[in-house]
Image: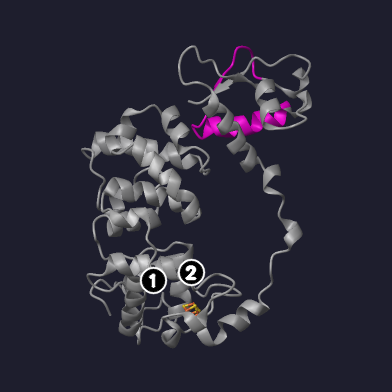
Amino acid sequence: MPRNASTTKSDPVLPHPDFSRLSAIQDALLAWFGECGRNLPWRHTRDPWAILVSEVMLQQIQVARAIPFYEAFLDRFPTIQSLADAPLADAIRVWGDLGRYRRIVHLHRTARIIVEVHGGLVPDDEAVLRSLPGIGPYTAGAVACFAYGHDTGFIDTNMRRVLHRVFLGADVPAPMVRDRELQTLAIAAVPSGRGWAWNQGLMDLGARVCTARKPACDQCPLGPHCTARPTIQGALDAAPRKSAGATPAYDSTNRYFRGRILAELRAIPPVPPENGITMPDLGQRVRPGFEPTDLPWLQEIVSGLAKDGLAAVAEDRPRYDAVDTDRPSTLRIKLP
Ligand code: SF4
């Protein structure tokens, strides 16, 4: 058991983690990562600000998609101070089409709190990090580990899958433990002094070898030690798949239109006089065939953006309602 393990094999919150081969598993993953780890820009820095930006961007975003946004963002905001000093509208413009737009609102608030409360230094304490806007256990652990070298454990989707399969068994049809227990397992599994490489290796193995539906067990460095290997493929074959017709086309979802609306707002020149864009004009720009009867739908999405701090709505007359579809709306929308 590593020195930072907070549980033992008999701990009741961990039903069956097999740590008997922990040392061999650690060695195998570290060796594989040393040979096959991906060359990613945020792996060449220990700058806590750059690490924080990368981790905020990367959650549920593919690595290849995130890289140009990461580089452009750090070009414009190379320090926490530079983001804290900037208007939120500038930050939203630089965030561009990356999506998950609440993250930039949180990151902007976090930068200001770090400057005002923490002297401009990203905290290294996970509990303090978790107190910042938008930072959960994963991001806090990743910053503590990747920027400050702490031997701590944390789980994203890929890490969760690998740890579950290796130490507990197949994660289908349902995981055997909750995230809280997997988090404890993740901490217990970290090799002393090698947390950075171990956690990066878990991420890469989950992304490239131990994938959700097609784990390449015959090419996996952990194959000889993996609890799930004998059963994983059969369990996956037996697991029900999502119906292909159940998911609506992305370009018909409100999430898609949030992105389209923000793209239009970003295109408004950030210099006075800048009065935003009217609702009908906005609707026609983001949705072909937009009709006045679509205004309530548009208003609902805009209201959500305003509530998330991503848009500002100036009301020149009482709030629009569906009965008013004959009157041109004078609501004007812009970045905050
Ligand atoms: S042996 Fe298979 S199930 Fe186990 S970690 Fe490797 S790819 Fe995943």
- In the rendered structure, which disc, 1 or 2, sits on the residue that comes first in sequence? 1
Q: Is residue 302 magenta?
A: yes
**Front in this rendered view, residue 203 or 38:** 38
Q: Left or right of 99: which side holds 245?
A: right
Total number of numbered labels? Answer: 2
Task: Indicate whether 328 appears above or below 133.
Answer: above
Identify residue for label 1: 36
Asked if the residue at label 1 sits under 8 Å from ligand 1, the reply is no
Residue at (74, 32) in percent of width and height? 288
Residue at (27, 49) in percent of width and height? 48
Identify residue for label 2: 208
Task: Indicate whether 238 appears above or below 160.
Answer: below
For disc 2, the neighbor class at 10 Å (few under 14, some 14 to 19, many from 20) is some
Q: Position of residue 153 (x, y in %)?
A: 34, 65
- Quadrant (top left, top right, bottom left, bottom right) of the N terminus: bottom left
Q: Position of residue 27 (x, y in %)?
A: 31, 80
Q: In this picture, which residue range is highlighted in magenta?
A: 295-319
Label 1 with label 2: CB-CB less than 8 Å: yes
